[in-house]
Amino acid sequence: NAGVTQTPKFRILKIGQSMTLQCTQDMNHNYMYWYRQDPGMGLKLIYYSVGAGITDKGEVPNGYNVSRSTTEDFPLRLELAAPSQTSVYFCDCRPLYCVSGYGYTFGSGTRLTVV
Amino acid sequence: RKEVEQDPGPFNVPEGATVAFNCTYSNSASQSFFWYRQDCRKEPKLLMSVYSSGNEDGRFTAQLNRASQYISLLIRDSKLSDSATYLCVVNSAISGGGADGLTFGKGTHLIIQP
């Protein structure tokens, strides 16, 4: 089991460019999440999905889009990159029956810089 | 070697017991260290920072050993509400620009049994 795989690990974008951050899990978990983490700040939820075909906005969705066509993949799309989107992005997945203390897996993160 | 490594558990511990988690990190230039707690369907929340001198917050004690690149968390008199995933987190600043970010371990799963 690879768990959660995020790609790329690092990326530098120019303002206005677009890109997709990939997140893939091989644990057949229903729930998947995208967070951003800024220096000195906690994690903020961007979007989440409770299963294939279902996505919902989190706390900071503006400037991002997601899709969940399969259980395994939950890509995060930046259409028009802005400097405010410079951050570290984490993907997370959890099973349907969530029991405190068991079953979560965080990705290794994607460091994005917009210049 | 993974950047931040933890025993995933699960640790099944009776209520009232003392439990200890360990974490190792690979980057000797790492500057800051933290323990986060993650509950079901919630984002991870900062539990405590970790200092070389050791620090205590109520029932929780954290310790850092820079020479061995090792971090620990001790929970005394464990409560049912302590059931969660505990993430070891390391801040290794990237030189030359880029977001100064945290690297999360995959978590240690703790289940407190009544």
Image (cartoon, rainbow, N blue to C red):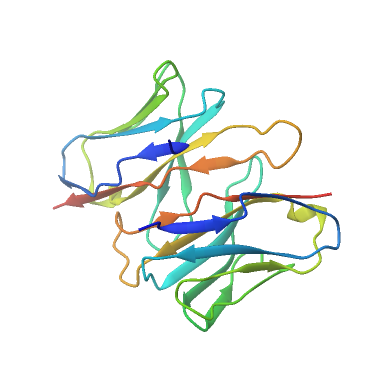
Q: Nearer the viewer, residue A86 or B81?
A: A86
The percent coordinates of residue B79 (x first, y second) are 23, 46
Residue A59 located left or right of residue B10: right
User: Residue at the location (13% across, 53% down)?
Assistant: B114
**How many numbered markers are drawn?**
0
Q: Is residue B56 visible?
A: no
The residue at the point 21 percent across, 37 percent down is B77
- Indicate whether B2 appears above or below A8: above
The vertical placement of A15 against B3, above or below, is below
Direction bottom: furthest residue = A53
Give residue A81's position: percent from left, percent from top: 80, 61
Q: Nearer the viewer, residue A83 or A115?
A: A115
From the viewer's perspective, tell me whether residue B66 is left or right of residue B17.
right
Q: Quadrant of the N terminus of chain B?
A: top left
Where is residue B12 shown, x and y percent of the image? 17, 48
Q: Which quadrant holds residue A80?
A: bottom right
Q: Considering only vertical position in the picture, is A79 above or below B19?
A: below
Residue plotted at (55% across, 27% down): B30
Would you say residue A59 is visible in this rendering? yes
Residue B60 position (above or below residue B79): above
Image coords of residue B89 (percent x, y): 48, 38
Give residue A44's quadrant in the image: bottom right
